[in-house]
Image: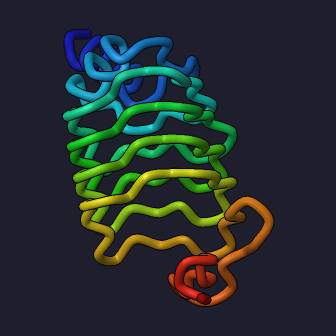
């Protein structure tokens, strides 16, 4: 009976089915072992310095004006998410995925993007077709 209770608790920590509604809830669930957070909406949330290595926000998560400054997001997936006006300054995004994401006005200054995937992401009117082949910005084209 005890092993069945343990299994039940561990199943709940893997995916509860409801997206976290705050930084505090996200951290608590992550620290308890949960990694799948589809449909998360944490716009205007201060997530600076947070550690979410290996988390998955795949499909329909929304991060508008979210602050990930200095966060550890190694291997984190933002696949098919909306990431707009978000701050990723000095964040560790190594191995993260923004594949097929809708991205607009994000700040990556000082961020570690080694191995980060942006294939198929829409950058406010353009798409990255090849592995991390970013379109030239107006400043670079001049």
Q: In the visual, does 93 lie left or right of 83?
A: left
Q: Does residue 50 sit above or below 138 in this rendering?
A: above
The residue at 69%/39% (across/down) is: 60
The residue at 46%/54% (across/down) is: 77
The residue nearer to you, when weighing 89 against 3, is 89
Q: Position of residue 122 (x, y in %)?
A: 71, 64
Q: In the visual, does 18 lie left or right of 36?
A: right
Q: Position of residue 33 (x, y in %)?
A: 26, 31
The residue nearer to you, when weighing 99 against 28, is 99
Quick one: quadrant of the C terminus? bottom right
The residue nearer to you, when weighing 103 against 54, is 103
Q: Position of residue 35 (x, y in %)?
A: 37, 38
Q: Does residue 56 sit above or below 134 in this rendering?
A: above
Q: Does residue 10 sit above or below 80 in this rendering?
A: above
Q: In the visual, does 10 lie left or right of 19?
A: left
- The total number of labels drawn is 0
Q: Position of residue 92 (x, y in %)?
A: 23, 56
The residue at 73%/74% (across/down) is: 127
- Most distant residue in the right direction: 125
Residue 79 location, quadrant: bottom right
The residue nearer to you, when weighing 69 against 29, is 69
Which coloring applies here? Answer: rainbow
Quick one: quadrant of the N terminus? top left
The residue at 24%/61% (across/down) is: 110
Q: In the visual, does 97 lie left or right of 63?
A: left
């Amino acid at each position: 009976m005890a092993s069945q209770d343990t299994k039940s608790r561990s199943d709940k920590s893997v995916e509860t089915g409801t997206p976290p509604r705050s930084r505090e809830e996200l951290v608590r669930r992550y620290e308890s072992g949960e990694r799948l957070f589809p449909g998360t909406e944490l716009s205007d949330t201060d997530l600076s310095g947070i550690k979410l290595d290996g988390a998955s926000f795949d499909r329909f998560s929304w991060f508008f004006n979210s602050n990930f400054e200095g966060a550890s997001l190694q291997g984190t997936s933002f696949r098919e998410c909306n990431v707009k006006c978000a701050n990723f300054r000095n964040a560790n995004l190594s191995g993260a995925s923004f594949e097929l994401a809708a991205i607009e006005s994000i700040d990556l200054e000082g961020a570690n993007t080694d191995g980060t995937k942006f294939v198929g992401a829409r950058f406010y009117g353009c798409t990255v077709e090849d592995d991390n082949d970013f379109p030239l910005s107006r400043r670079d084209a001049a």
